[in-house]
Image: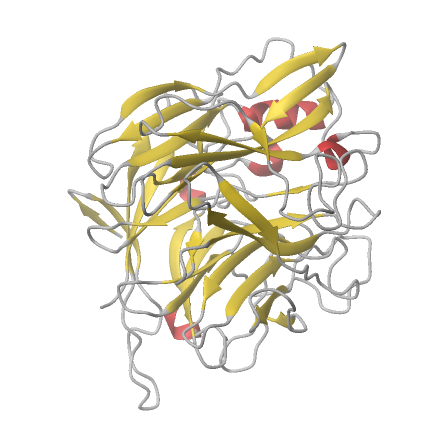
Amino acid sequence: MLQLAAGLVLGFAAGSGAAGGVPAAPAIKVVRTVHWEQPSMLEEAVVGWLGYVSPDRNILMETLTFGGQRGFYFTVRGQSIRDHHPREPLLRRSPDNGRTWENGGTWAAATPIHGRWILNREDPNYIYNPKTGTLLRLYRTTETIDGILPWIKGSPVGRTGLLWTQLSRDGGRTWSEPEQLVCSGPEFDPTHWAPGLWYGQNSGGVQGVTPVWLPDGRFLLPFFGVPGNELHRYSSACLVGAWRSDDRGVDWALTAYATVNPDCSYSGGDEPSVALLPDGRWLMTMRAYTPGNFQIAVPSGRFFTTTSDQGKTWSEPELLRFTDGRQVYCPASLTHVFRSTKNGRLYLITNILDRPTVACDPRTTLQIAEMDLKTLRVMPETVTVIESRDAAAGQPANIRFSNFRRYEDRETRNIVLVMTGCPGDVGRSESCGVPPHSYRYEITLPE
């Protein structure tokens, strides 16, 4: 590794030397710097959303959350979190493309309902109107019971998720009253708010993703939920938004769903990512989950599907492979797929392993790789490490580098990724060996 003034150079593309006469792949360079320095080891800072909020000015906004990992692992172990009171998420705004940041207030993440019941408000996503600059804030609420984890039997989280929107015409300084997102069409209402979804029965939502813009001005947000009655069987889709001509909001639609066969994933297909292909198709990736106590025909798979009719139908999900035919092994973790405006190429960011695993670990190395636009297969010579476990520094064996956020810098057209290391199953403590800071990774792609 090389220590530079701008930060730490973490990785270059594999295959820098040509083998058997095959030209070397263009190099990808990664430089890490501190994005947010967090003084308390017990209260890590995690970016929940980060992206542009103006069509013509390089203004960024982000949400920073604090201390969630410590509270989660205390709950898993049945330990008291009585004295664990992380501060509310912080909203920040940068008027100069991330060079400087200003405080934009806090986000009320949890509100008491009654007794042990709590209304959770997840980190917001932002989408601007490309014609007027009006800003839309989109977030999900769920109802939860204090002390019951979201996926435990008896938790209401999987049945109570709803999406809400607000508008701002002053750059995010003030907002309209929340309005529930209900898909367009006479069959939809606040209870049956999207295809296959009813409040009180199941739910769906989006994560901290920036919109993918279509040529006609509409935008896509990767969406996943449980349109059936099995709360652990996820399906993925795209939420399609179209700004109204009067600038008073967005009309919403949801594409058809896609999922992964039970032979290949216990929990279906979730945490999707979407990219536009040169031939007009949409490419959607899906996460698969391999539990340790189930027989899965294809363990540790990552799957993708395409649509040529703008989401009315999806192709049969395919297993992600390298160009030489080998399976790309992945834990159950986040994937982002995207096209670079710098070179038009297709890239994927995820945790790539050298052998099958079960469940969510290891996520000890995060990589970026180019995908062949014709075969939609990963080019192994381009696999580049973004971050990896530092065993010499005492980092735990199952440290997790995942749950990142990403955008493309408008000035450099490099990829900016922000991520905080997670101590994994050892939990966050003073001696866990995992810094609580949020790090910025500038990923320079070839021309």
Vertical order, 226 against 153 (above or below): below
Vertical order, 8 against 44 (above or below): below
Whole-percent x and y of residue 343?
28, 68
Left or right placement of residue 409 versus residue 245 in this view: left
Vertical order, 214 against 138 (above or below): below
Vertical order, 236 against 87 (above or below): below
Colouring style: secondary structure
Q: Closer to the camera, 393 or 70?
A: 70
Q: Is residue 429 in sight in this rendering?
A: no
Residue at 41 percent of width and 22 percent of height: 90
Q: Quadrant of residue 110?
A: top right
Left or right placement of residue 68 versus residue 358 in this view: left
Q: Is residue 40 in sight in this rendering?
A: yes
Left or right placement of residue 201 versus residue 62 in this view: right
Residue at 60 percent of width and 9 percent of height: 83
Q: Closer to the camera, 264 or 92?
A: 92
Whole-percent x and y of residue 232?
77, 47
Q: Closer to the camera, 55 or 302?
A: 55
